[in-house]
Amino acid sequence: MVFRAARVAVFVDGCFWHGCPEHGTWPKIHAKWWRAKIEGNRRRDLETDKQLAREGWTVVRLWSHQDSTATSRRVASLVRRRMIKGQS
């Protein structure tokens, strides 16, 4: 999700595809390929975060297993703060 006016980018990462430390799994079949794929996703995520930060964005990374009510409130609060800050 993108909140353009507040310059907040929100990513909801899947546990498998992004290597969640709590729920991520490492397949046994084609293990080398999958490890490279998932680690590559994580490196790309980090580079994306850095690039957006250099351009003045705040990046929020959420795991798909996180409570949606709590994360929605967290994002809403951040967006409000960024909007107020931008008006000053």
Image: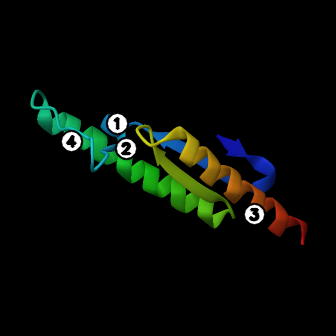
Q: Are marks 2 and 1 in contact (CB under 8 Å)?
A: yes
CA gap, disc 2 to disc 3? Answer: 30 Å
Identity of the residue drawn at 36% across and 42% down: 18
Secondary structure beneath label 1: helix
View extreme (bottom): residue: 88
The amino acid pointed to by label 3 is Arg
- How much space separates mark 1 and mark 4, taking CA atoms? 10 Å
Residue at 90% over, 72% down: 88
Mark identifier at residue 81? 3
Asked if labels 1 and 3 touch by Cβ distance under 8 angstroms, the answer is no
Of tags 2 and 1, the one toward the viewer is 1
Name above or below for residue 27 compared with residue 41: above
Distance from disc 3 to disc 4, alpha carbons, whole Å, reads 38 Å
- Amino acid at pointer 1: Trp
Going from N to C along the chain, the mark reached first, 2 or 3, is: 2
- Name the one closer to the observer, 64 or 11: 64
Q: Residue furthest left?
A: 28
Label 4 environment density (alpha carbons within 10 Å; few <14, some 14–19, many ≥20): some
Q: From mark 2 to mark 1, how far is it between C-alphas?
A: 7 Å
| Front disc: 3 or 1 | 3
Which label sits on residue 41?
2
- For disc 3, the neighbor class at 10 Å (few under 14, some 14 to 19, many from 20) is few
State the scheme by which the image is colored: rainbow
Q: Which residue is mark 1?
A: 17
Question: In the figure, is residue 83 to the left or right of 19?
Answer: right
The residue pinned by badge 4 equals 35
Separation (CA) of disc 4 from disc 2: 10 Å
